[in-house]
């Protein structure tokens, strides 16, 4: 079963403004004669940042066979049901005070490695803070955000009980 996700307001705004800013700065070097190399550098740098943040963001979540799959354009993530020890709804306060270790802090979502005092180290693949789910596994914590949070939790619990 496929579970879609949607950007919350803050992720939409961050993505919109950061994208506009990066696209605008790509053409800064083109205003001065003889600075073509700055334009090329900015296009390559900003274009790469935009491409990779877009390609790595969580597109949707899927429950298939014995796994939860976080679909991305590059490198999907599989979480085996056998590793899951707990699944529950999570409120935005759960991730407050989090520090991004490696990942995106709002451009096309919140995803990557994070840590805070309450959770310790965890992986987050979130586009909507109001729809978050905590998946506690044997060796890892995941925070995700399918649009149908309650349906997703119910289906995961059904697989865990089987």
Image: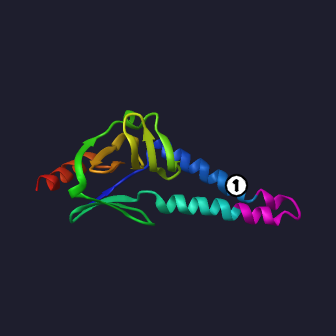
In the shown orientation, is residue 19 left or right of residue 60? right
In the shown orientation, is residue 135 left or right of residue 8? left
Q: Coloured how?
A: rainbow
Q: Viewer-proximal residue, 15 or 138? A: 138
Is 65 a magenta residue?
no
Q: Viewer-proximal residue, 31 or 103? A: 103
Q: Residue at x 80, y 61 (%)?
A: 30
Q: Residue at x 36, y 40 (%)?
A: 130
Is 37 a magenta residue?
yes
List the residue tagged with mark 1: 24
In the shown orientation, is residue 32 left or right of residue 66? right
User: Where 55 sits versus 152, above or below?
Assistant: below
| Quadrant occupied by the C terminus | bottom left
Query: Where is residue 9 drawn, in percent x and y?
Result: 47, 42
Q: Give the magenta part as a residue range.
A: 28-42
| Quadrant occupied by the N terminus | bottom left
Tell me which corner region of the image, top left, top right, bottom left or bottom right, holds residue 50: bottom right
Query: Where is residue 51 drawn, in percent x and y?
Result: 56, 63
Tell me which corner region of the image, top left, top right, bottom left or bottom right, holds residue 83: bottom left
Q: Residue at x 39, y 46 (%)?
A: 122
In the shown orientation, is residue 128 left or right of residue 136? right
Q: How many marks?
A: 1
Label 1: element kind: helix
Provide the major secondary structure of the magenta segment.
helix
């Amino acid at each position: 079963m496929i579970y879609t996700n949607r950007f919350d307001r803050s992720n939409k705004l961050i993505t919109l403004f950061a994208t506009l800013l990066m696209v605008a700065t790509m053409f800064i070097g083109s205003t001065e004669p003889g600075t073509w190399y700055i334009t090329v550098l900015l296009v390559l740098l900003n274009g790469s940042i935009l491409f990779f943040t877009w390609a790595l963001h969580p597109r949707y979540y899927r429950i298939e066979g014995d796994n939860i799959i976080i679909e991305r354009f590059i490198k999907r993530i599989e979480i085996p049901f056998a590793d899951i020890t707990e699944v529950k709804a999570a409120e935005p306060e759960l991730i407050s005070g989090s520090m991004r270790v490696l990942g995106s802090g709002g451009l096309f979502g919140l995803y990557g490695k994070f840590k805070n005092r309450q959770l310790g180290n965890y992986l987050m693949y979130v586009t909507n803070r109001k729809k978050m789910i905590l998946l506690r596994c044997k060796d890892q914590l995941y925070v995700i955000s399918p649009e149908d949070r309650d349906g997703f939790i119910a289906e995961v619990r059904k697989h865990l009980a089987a």
